[in-house]
Image (cartoon, rainbow, N blue to C red):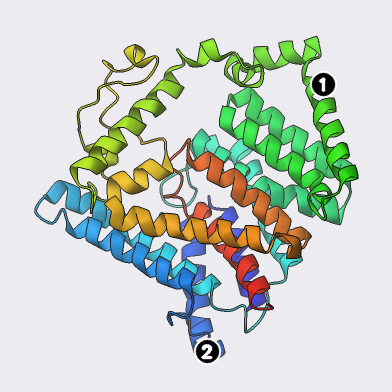
Amino acid sequence: MTKKINIYLFFMLASFLMIVGVNISFFLFFSLIFKSIKSTNLNIFKINNNIKFFALLFGLGALLSTISNFNNELLFNSSMSVLPNYIYWVIMIFFFSSFQNKFKINQYLAFKSISFGVILVIFYYLFLHDVIANKMFFKKFTPNNISFLLICYVPYLIFYLKRRYSFKISFFILIIILGSLLISGRRAGFGLVFIGGLATLFHDNFKNISILKIMKSIIIILFIGLIFQIKPIKNSIFNSSPRIHSIIYNDLNNLETDRSSLVRKAMIEKGISLLNSNILYGVGLNNFNKSETEITGNFVGSEYVIDKNIFEKTSSHNSYINMFAEGGLFLGIPFLLILLFIIKNFISIFNKLNDFDLIILISFSCMLVHLYFINAIVNSLAWLNICLALTTILRIKNKL
């Protein structure tokens, strides 16, 4: 079972590999489910903890949101096309929150599998993506897709490289990844990969907090801050990406006229308006960009986007807003309960986390921040990260 889980993790990260348009990991997952039911008696579908109950409510909310549009063929079909994904994510939570009493994941091998998947997907995206990407066998990534993957899973890669090889190699790989994000102008990606990677490199400072470790952390932060103030580095960042330069050097005037930031603000307002129009069920799964509503533009800089054609066929750019707007309270509240369960328990067991657990916490924290800037919660990689966080929490809680 352990070997099968590690193979599944590898193909989840090497998510560009498909069979007739379906990710290979999807087939591997249901092979895992079948084997676990047949040979290990894991009671996967038994509601024996709070997180399974929250996941069940989440699945029910997705179903109700879909059914609510039964009389609107366009919206109903749109929801039906993604409903299987929501069911898949619920089953993922059921599976990963069931087996800790039966056996334990080998965390080192799991990190190794994830790291090899990250390396392969980076190689694919840089050298093969534009040549062989298609709808059948090799997934076409958007820059946002690859940025989200790196935000979530670069900490796993950096930690594995540091543990398996050396600090220097892991630091060198992190610099290469950050350089590629800088050149491609991925602001959130650059910032959160930088934070997650740096926290991973110096993760020991989070263990058994002391005055000495606090002082070391402050010195590291100040040293990095000084490096960013070196004129050639500032100029290099500006030449590579003026948008990232604005973030790093706090040029807020540019942000007030930046169309990307302003569209995100407009979509937040749209999402709140859609939720208010159907507070229980929302507008239906996958229907945010198919729904119109009145936007007043109650934010600084709205004059730059309010009259533009952005209120249809535009993503919500915010996972939390999207979840409530499309699924209403019946979907949004269970989703928040799942996240709050993880956050609350990470806080309560923090002193019992091992090195691997700390990296999972770093990854999960970076993901939560990024979910505010992108609708990536509809990505299975987000739910895998949630499930990995759950395995850590439930493993430790089962020992208490």
Q: Which mark is residue 227?
A: 1
Q: Is residue 125 visible?
A: yes
Cα distance between the residues tagged 1 and 2: 55 Å
Are the two marked residues, 1 and 2, in contact with CB atoms closer than 8 angstroms? no
- Image coordinates for residue 274, horizontal then vertical, percent: 24, 39
> Residue 315 occupies which quadrant of the picture?
top left
Q: Which residue is found at the position 62% from the left and 82% from the top?
A: 101
Crowding at dot 1, Cα within 10 Å, few <14 / some 14-19 / many 20+, comes out as few
Image quadrant in which the N terminus is located: bottom right
Residue 234 lies left or right of residue 23; in this view the side is right
Q: Nearer the viewer, residue 106 or 321?
A: 321
Q: Which residue is found at the position 70% from the left and 32% from the top?
A: 178
Q: Which residue is found at the position 60% from the left and 14% from the top?
A: 242
Residue 254 in the image: above or below residue 381: above
Residue 142 in the image: above or below residue 311: below
Residue 97 lies left or right of residue 6; in this view the side is left
> Residue 187 occupies which quadrant of the picture?
top right
Residue 181 in the image: above or below residue 283: above
- Image coordinates for residue 88, horizontal then vertical, percent: 41, 65
Amino acid bearing label 2: Asn
Q: Which residue is found at the position 83% from the left and 41% from the top?
A: 214
Residue 218 in the image: above or below residue 360: above
Task: Mark 1 or mark 2: name the one nearer the start of the chain.
Answer: 2
- Image coordinates for residue 227, horizontal then vertical, percent: 82, 21
Q: Which residue is mark 2?
A: 41
Q: Nearer the viewer, residue 344 or 108?
A: 344
Crowding at dot 2, Cα within 10 Å, few <14 / some 14-19 / many 20+, comes out as few
Amino acid bearing label 1: Ile
